[in-house]
Image (cartoon, rainbow, N blue to C red):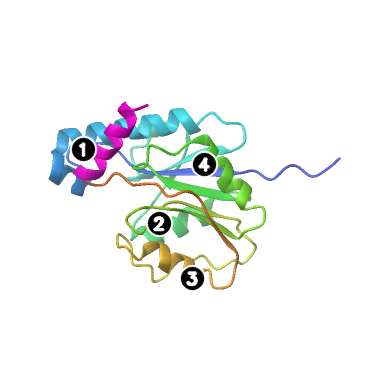
Amino acid sequence: MGAEPTQQHLVLFSRQPRYGVGKRRLAADVGNLEAVRFARAALARLRRTLGRDPRWTLWMAVSPDRPTDWAAPARVIPQGPGHLGEKLERVVRALPRGPVVILGADTPTVTRQDVARAFAALGNHDAVFGPARDGGYWLIGLRRRPRMHLPFEGVRWSTQHALADTVANMQTLPVALLRLQEDVDDGASLRRYLSQARRG
């Protein structure tokens, strides 16, 4: 009998979409009601688009750690405490063997093709990134070699340097880039997303 194929893990990082919780920059521009409406719609769209593909297993990395019933029926893993880098490292280390691709819930334009390209890139790269317009990234994928040093230390999160810092932490290991997309984190980016969605 041959070896079982390596499992591919897709992780959707999400805060529970509740009124007045999370999306603070967006809420400051458009109000709490519009912010939570976007958060719920974006999460639903991503789960509907990406959640039933046999090529990968969908996980939800959730915050707060409890309750988790809102994330069902996906496999749930808590983000835990700390800054984003600590949460990413905790989740990556907790998953079963196999390549992992992680994306946030504030880029609802992500498609199955984007995710498939990310996993394909990990065939001959140690990491793959989806660059965001603000200097961060909407996706990170890691091949997860044994004893691999994860690239999250010293990253200036929520700044224009986040992608550059994380890539620099990869040192000489091969890295791939996907298409540029935009996180929806303020009123202007929400208006651009809604305009794009209306156009089809």
Element under disc 2: helix
Q: Inspect the image, locate mark 1, and give the three-letter code of the amino acid beneath it.
A: Ala
Q: Earlier in the sequence, mark 3 or mark 4?
A: 4
Disc 2 residue type (three-letter): Lys
Q: Earlier in the sequence, mark 1 or mark 3?
A: 1
Which percent across, then down, holds residue 21? 21, 43
Of circles 3 and 2, the one toward us is 3
Q: Residues within 10 Å of mark 2 (few under 14, many from 20)?
A: some
x and y percent of residue 91 in the render?
47, 53
Pick whichever, 27 or 148, lies toward us: 27
- Looking at this view, is 55 or 96 the one in front? 55
Q: Amino acid at mark 4?
A: Asp
Q: Which residue is mark 3?
A: 169
Q: Quadrant of residue 195?
A: top left
Q: Which residues are magenta?
A: 187-200
Numbered marks: total: 4
Residue 29 among those drawn in magenta: no
Which residue is pictured at 53% across the width and 68% down the height? 170
**Which mark identifies residue 87?**
2
> Which x, y percent locates residue 182?
35, 47
* Left or right of 34 on screen, residue 92: right
Tag nearer the camera, 2 or 1 = 1
Residue wearing tag 4: 114
Q: CA distance from mark 3 to mark 2?
A: 17 Å
Q: Which residue is mark 1?
A: 35
Above/below status of 49 relative to 160? above
